[in-house]
Amino acid sequence: MVDCMFGVLAMMLPDKVMAAGDGGNSGISIGGYDADRKPFVYVDFTCGAWGGRPWADGLDGNSHMFANMASQSIEVTEAEQPVSLLAYEFVPDKAGAGKYRGGVPFRRDYRFNEVEGVLQVRSDRRDHLPFGLYGGNPGRPSENYLNPDTEPRPLPGKFTMTVKKGDVLRHVLAGAGEWGDPLKRDPLAVLQDVRNEFLSIAKAKEDYGVVLDTQRWAVNDAET
């Protein structure tokens, strides 16, 4: 709803409005009973990619300005719930290209440690990508997988299912939309994104036209 409102305002205030973010909160919940029939419920709301702004890149790993939430602490989760967090990391090449790129999204891998439970996921930005503005490309869609290392089948954006001990859910946030023509992005900013592993060398060339010398970690001005 907020992205929709900003998209309308961008037509009137192009120098003040950012592109679409990751779609708000992805809701991850796991519930059930332990061996003593004591109930448990784990709920995690993940969000963290702002759209590119007319004056700067979108924020990485920050909740949407209207979300007012943050991801659950790994240490608290593992101490209090039958869940282990195997990964919590940024995902490269998910933010679309623009003069000012959108926030880079992250993924979280949840391993279920109880005998059986019910998993429910509510995520967004699967079919309708986070839009870019004024020449910026849209971000990449959100992703859900169960046991991604053994059965890498994509799951819907929203679903409820039974999970067993050892099952792993991988949730990847959508990448945020970009602002402005990607060919106008500062090549040094592209280099920095590659060094920070937000962007691959191949996508730096494909999306931004920037060719990098990885031996010296410098921009190849002649080929860019």
Image (cartoon, rainbow, N blue to C red):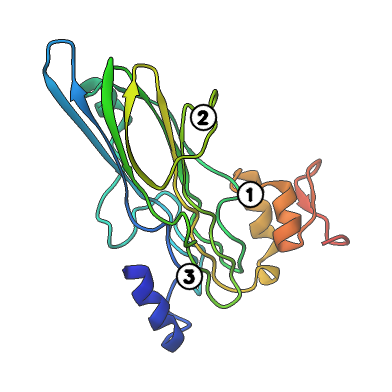
The percent position of residue 2, horizontal first and vertical second, equals 32, 69
Quadrant assignment for the C terminus:
bottom right
SS type, badge 2:
loop
Q: Residue at x 74, y 49 (%)?
A: 202
Q: Which residue is mark 1?
A: 199
Left-right relation of 116 to 49: left
Please report contact status of discs 3 and 2: CB closer than 8 Å, yes or no: no
Check the image and report above or below for 191 versus 216.
below
Q: Residue at x 59, y 66 (%)?
A: 137
Q: CA distance from mark 3 to mark 1?
A: 19 Å
Q: Nearer the viewer, residue 31 or 134?
A: 31
Ranked by sequence position, the earlier of labels 1 and 2 is 2
Please report contact status of discs 1 and 2: CB closer than 8 Å, yes or no: no
SS type, badge 1:
loop
Residue 148 — which label?
2
Question: What amino acid is found at the position of numbered circle 2 in the picture?
Answer: Pro
